[in-house]
């Protein structure tokens, strides 16, 4: 929980189609290894340039651990067609696949730090249609609505479950119509709904059967091992569906409040998922995973963008250079 992404970065124009090297890729038998797009204008990339000019060479080198790696583009609010088209054409021009997050469901984030979203059913369906048209025939991994299913399963009463699942099913089906879209419906994380069986009925109602699979650990900190064990269990319960995992900030695992020498923060907003201290970048993004049902390890949450106004952070989705530097400095590679 606590995704906290607002808006999408615009990329330059371009044409072309993603290409692969032909290498075996994770769980998708016979699939080609895919290179993922790196945004040259990301906040991290701009920070690297700024710090090099300012003479902060060591900090710039650390920040390049974020800037040089593929990260998802979060799409929300108005003009999804324009935003998606810009990102995917830039990726295709580079011969790479974009990673996108569709994030505009009504009642988004159950009124927490990233609250908002479309105003209603018709607005959302129109938004999804525009998102899909923006994809065209270009290749992309699309993560559908982080938190949207798990929030309902966890007891969010601010949304109608049946209506939300119907909207999610529409989004999955509509986006999946695009010929080179790989669609993954978000399923929360292993620390939020510890029993994967609790998600099965909800995910099916939300259209996971029409998707390529489901996504785990978006904007969270669960370890690769825990997410893989959980993902395999959920996959079995869903008849063998594949999945992707967000590894952007899980290098040190989740914050437990017992980490020696780390200030936990104060106040009721200091949730363990919200800008926790002492975390680190995780496994770099790759479509070669070595696990039969794990299609990719992705950086879905953009490292260094705030989870919300907790522990001194800026509003959700805003760039926070000091937090980004901490993540990079704690990383093992």
Image: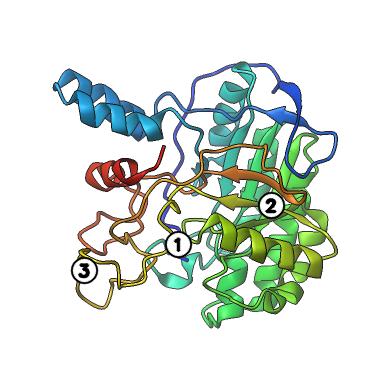
Badge 2: residue crowd in 10 Å (few <14, some 14–19, many ≥20)? many
Mark 2 or mark 3: which comes first in sequence?
Answer: 2
Residue in view at x 51 percent, y 38 percent = 284
Name the residue carrying label 3.
Answer: 265
Residue 116 tag number: 1
Mark 2: secondary structure: strand
The C terminus, quarter of image: top left
- What is the distance, in whole Å, between disc 2 and disc 3 at their CAs? 34 Å
Which of the 4 image quarters holds residue 238?
A: bottom right
Instruction: Tell me if residue 57 comes above or below residue 180 in the rendering.
Output: above
Which numbered disc, 1 or 2, marks the residue closer to the eye?
2
Name the residue carrying label 2.
Answer: 184
Badge 1: residue crowd in 10 Å (few <14, some 14–19, many ≥20)? some
Residue 156 drawn at (x, y percent): 53, 80
Which residue is nearer to you in this view: 63 or 171? 63
Residue 283 drawn at (x, y percent): 51, 43
Mark 1: secondary structure: loop
Which residue is nearer to you in this view: 14 or 257? 257
Residue in view at x 43 percent, y 51 percent = 251
Contact flag, marks 3 and 1 (Cβ < 8 Å): no
Mark 3: secondary structure: loop
Instruction: Tell me if residue 325 comes above or below residue 110 in the rendering.
Output: above
Residue 239 drawn at (x, y percent): 85, 64
- Determine whether, in the image, residue 79 is placed left or right of residue 51: right
């Amino acid at each position: 929980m606590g995704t906290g992404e607002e808006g999408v970065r615009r990329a330059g124009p371009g044409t072309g189609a993603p290409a692969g090297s032909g290498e075996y890729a994770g769980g998708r038998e016979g699939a080609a290894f895919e290179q993922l797009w790196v945004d040259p204008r990301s906040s991290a990339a701009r920070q690297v340039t700024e710090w090099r000019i300012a003479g902060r060479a060591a900090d710039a080198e650390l920040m390049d651990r974020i800037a040089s790696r593929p990260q998802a583009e979060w799409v929300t609010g108005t003009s999804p067609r324009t935003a998606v088209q810009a990102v995917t054409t830039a990726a295709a021009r580079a011969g790479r696949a974009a990673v996108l997050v569709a994030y505009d469901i009504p009642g988004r984030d159950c009124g927490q730090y990233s609250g908002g979203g479309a105003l209603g059913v018709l607005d959302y369906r129109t938004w999804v249609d525009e998102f899909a048209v923006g994809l065209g025939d270009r290749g992309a991994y699309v993560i559908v609505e982080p938190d949207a299913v798990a929030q309902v399963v966890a007891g969010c009463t601010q949304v109608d479950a049946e209506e939300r699942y119907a909207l999610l099913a529409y989004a999955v089906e509509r986006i999946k119509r695009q010929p080179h879209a790989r669609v993954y419906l978000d399923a929360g994380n292993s620390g939020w709904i510890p029993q994967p069986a609790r998600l099965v009925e909800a995910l099916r109602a939300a259209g996971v059967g029409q998707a390529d699979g489901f996504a785990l650990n978006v904007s969270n900190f669960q370890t690769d091992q825990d997410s893989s064990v959980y993902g395999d269990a959920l996959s079995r319960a869903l008849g063998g569906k594949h999945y992707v995992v967000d590894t952007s900030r899980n290098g040190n695992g989740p914050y437990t409040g017992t980490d020696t020498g780390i200030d936990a923060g104060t106040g009721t907003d200091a949730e363990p998922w919200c800008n926790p201290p002492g975390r680190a970048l995780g496994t770099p993004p790759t479509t070669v995973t070595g696990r039969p049902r794990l299609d990719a390890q992705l950086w879905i949450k953009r490292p260094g963008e705030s989870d919300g106004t907790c522990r001194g952070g800026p509003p959700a989705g805003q760039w926070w250079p000091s937090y980004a530097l901490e993540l990079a400095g704690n990383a093992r590679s």
